[in-house]
Image (cartoon, helix red, strand yellow):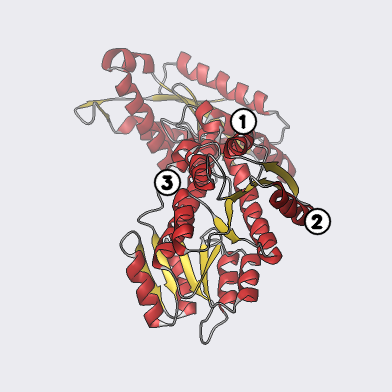
């Protein structure tokens, strides 16, 4: 895959070296020679991934990383610190600044390309979520990117899969101060737990005695429940080939033994923060989709959804030569309810009406709020006589029991008028069917309300 990689270094030969290696693998390479220039490029959206040198005059790489990760517009950018510093304390400082990974100079070609490909793949997966999430503020919601960037990566659920008890116990002790940790020595049992419970991350030892750890990682990436769960693998110093294979399979990160406690805590926190970032974006996308088709008050489908689905139902009816019935109902004297008891009481009436209708229809029927105090029920494979019986049952459901308003302090009687039209043996459009039902509804009102009127066949 290709991506736009920003190389940040104050030494031009270092930039050219990385540019040559990346360009040979068809990555587009941009460059910056200081921190401010790098931040400007990132904020403009011109890059997908940052290779960031640590030692630079003025603003060093740690400060650049902190600024990028604290901004909602750039927090999603993967950042790889490229440094000659190889002490655990230096790596910890970078992870605390928000770095996603490290490369130590001189940079190994295989490690460079594997990390760039892995992080570029992750960036691609989140870009569409971010684009959709940006619609949320326009729809009146909170800024989803700001909320996602504010994640701290603490108090997550972590499953350690390691059959070396001493190793797993040490890691659990290190992590338990900031995370909730479980240990599972059986790989198959671990896979079952990952599917059944809500874990934020898995730590898998590549040295499992009687099971191929790479297969376990592959299975986690295949299953729907664990597909997006971060995986960190533990490797021995001579396990480079298996580590690279693990990254190709979609593993997010790795640590080599002996594991530095502080680096383990920081890497786990980074992965959990990144997962929660993506989860928030997915939730925002889902909420935005629901806002587009769900009425916020009654939680029924809205008129937009009804219109799109009704055309499909009518087409199916024509193809199968089966009837489809459309009934529109209007809560009687609803304005009087609002004027007498207040709009809050009116909202309570609408919510209760929706609940009563929902309980009284079949699973295949389509129920929607049409607008104001009007509701629609579409009944596939239902002729006019069966539909009339259903409409009469719905009318009685609304009339029979009083409605409670003002949070249960008062009861009032509510009725509704129904207009019913059926497409049975004729070809109609959505508009013509709805118009016939609407005309029947007005006839029901003219006849005194609280009744069902069927449109002429």
> What's the residue at 41%, 64% (across, down)?
158
- Quarter of the figure with the C terminus: top right
Viewer can see residue 31: yes
| Left or right, residue 15 beside residue 251 | right
| Left or right, residue 314 beside residue 394 | right
Looking at the image, the residue that sits furthest to the bottom is 210
Mark 2 Cα shell of 10 Å, populated few (<14), some (14-19), many (≥20): few
Viewer can see residue 377: no
CA–CA distance in space, label 1 to label 3:
39 Å
User: Which residue is nearer to you in this view: 27 or 364?
Assistant: 27
- Quarter of the figure with the N terminus: bottom right
Mark 3 Cα shell of 10 Å, populated few (<14), some (14-19), many (≥20): some
Mark 1 or mark 3: which is in front?
Answer: 3
> What's the residue at 47%, 33% (across, down)?
143
Report the disc number at residue 133.
none
Residue 189 placed where, x, y %? Answer: 45, 77
Question: What residue sits right under mark 3 in the picture?
Answer: 151
Q: What element carries label 1?
A: helix
Q: In which quarter of the image is residue 170?
A: bottom left
Question: What residue sits right under mark 2 in the picture?
Answer: 24
Image vertical order of residue 449 relative to residue 221, above or below: above
Q: For the residues labelled 2 and 1, say whether their Cβ atoms are less than 8 Å apart.
A: no
Residue 41 placed where, x, y %? Answer: 64, 36
Mark 2 or mark 1: which is in front?
Answer: 2
Question: What residue sits right under mark 1 in the picture?
Answer: 307
Q: What element carries label 3?
A: loop
Q: In which quarter of the image is residue 4?
A: top right
Q: Is mark 2 on a helix, strand or loop?
A: loop
User: Which residue is nearer to you in this view: 30 or 54?
Assistant: 54
């Amino acid at each position: 895959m290709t991506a736009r990689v920003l190389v940040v270094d104050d030494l031009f030969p270092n930039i050219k070296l990385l540019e040559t290696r990346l360009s040979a693998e068809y990555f587009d390479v941009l460059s910056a020679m200081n921190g401010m220039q790098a931040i400007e490029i990132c904020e403009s959206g011109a890059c997908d991934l940052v290779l960031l040198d640590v030692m630079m005059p003025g603003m060093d790489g740690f400060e650049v990383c902190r600024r990028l990760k604290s901004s909602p517009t750039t927090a999603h950018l993967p950042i790889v610190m490229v440094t000659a510093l190889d002490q655990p304390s230096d790596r910890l400082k970078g992870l605390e600044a928000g770095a996603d990974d490290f490369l130590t100079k001189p940079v190994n070609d295989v490690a460079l390309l594997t990390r760039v490909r892995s992080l570029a793949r992750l960036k691609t997966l989140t870009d569409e979520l971010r684009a959709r999430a940006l619609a949320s503020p326009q729809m009146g919601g909170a800024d989803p990117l700001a909320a996602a960037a504010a994640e701290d990566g603490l108090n997550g659920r972590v499953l350690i899969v390691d059959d070396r008890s001493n190793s797993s116990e040490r890691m659990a002790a290190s992590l338990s101060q900031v995370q909730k940790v479980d240990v599972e020595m059986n790989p198959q049992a671990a896979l079952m737990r990952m599917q059944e419970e809500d874990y934020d991350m898995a730590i898998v030892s590549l040295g499992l005695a009687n099971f191929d750890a790479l297969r376990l990682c592959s299975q986690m990436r295949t299953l729907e429940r664990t597909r997006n769960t971060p995986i960190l693998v533990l490797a021995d110093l001579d396990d480079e080939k298996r580590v690279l294979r693990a990254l190709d399979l979609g593993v997010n990160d790795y640590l080599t033994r002996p594991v530095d406690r502080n680096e383990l805590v920081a890497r786990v926190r980074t992965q959990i923060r990144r997962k929660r970032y993506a989860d928030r974006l997915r939730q925002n996308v889902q909420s935005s989709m629901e806002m587009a088709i769900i009425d916020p008050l009654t939680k029924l489908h809205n008129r937009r959804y009804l219109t799109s689905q009704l055309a499909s139902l009518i087409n199916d009816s024509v193809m199968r030569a089966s009837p489809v019935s459309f009934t529109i109902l209007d809560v009687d004297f609803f304005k009087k309810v609002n004027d007498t008891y207040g709009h809050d009481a009116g909202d309570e009436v609408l919510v209760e009406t929706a609940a009563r209708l929902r309980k009284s229809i079949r699973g295949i029927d389509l129920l929607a709020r049409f607008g104001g105090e009007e509701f629609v029920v579409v009944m596939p494979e239902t002729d006019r006589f069966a539909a009339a019986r259903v409409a009469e049952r719905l009318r009685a459901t609304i009339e029979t029991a009083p409605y409670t308003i003002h949070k249960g302090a008062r009861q009032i009687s509510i009725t509704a008028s129904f207009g019913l039209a059926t497409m049975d043996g004729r070809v109609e459009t959505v508009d013509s069917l709805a118009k016939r039902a609407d005309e029947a509804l007005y006839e029901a009102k003219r006849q005194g309300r609280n009744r069902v009127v069927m449109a002429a066949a």
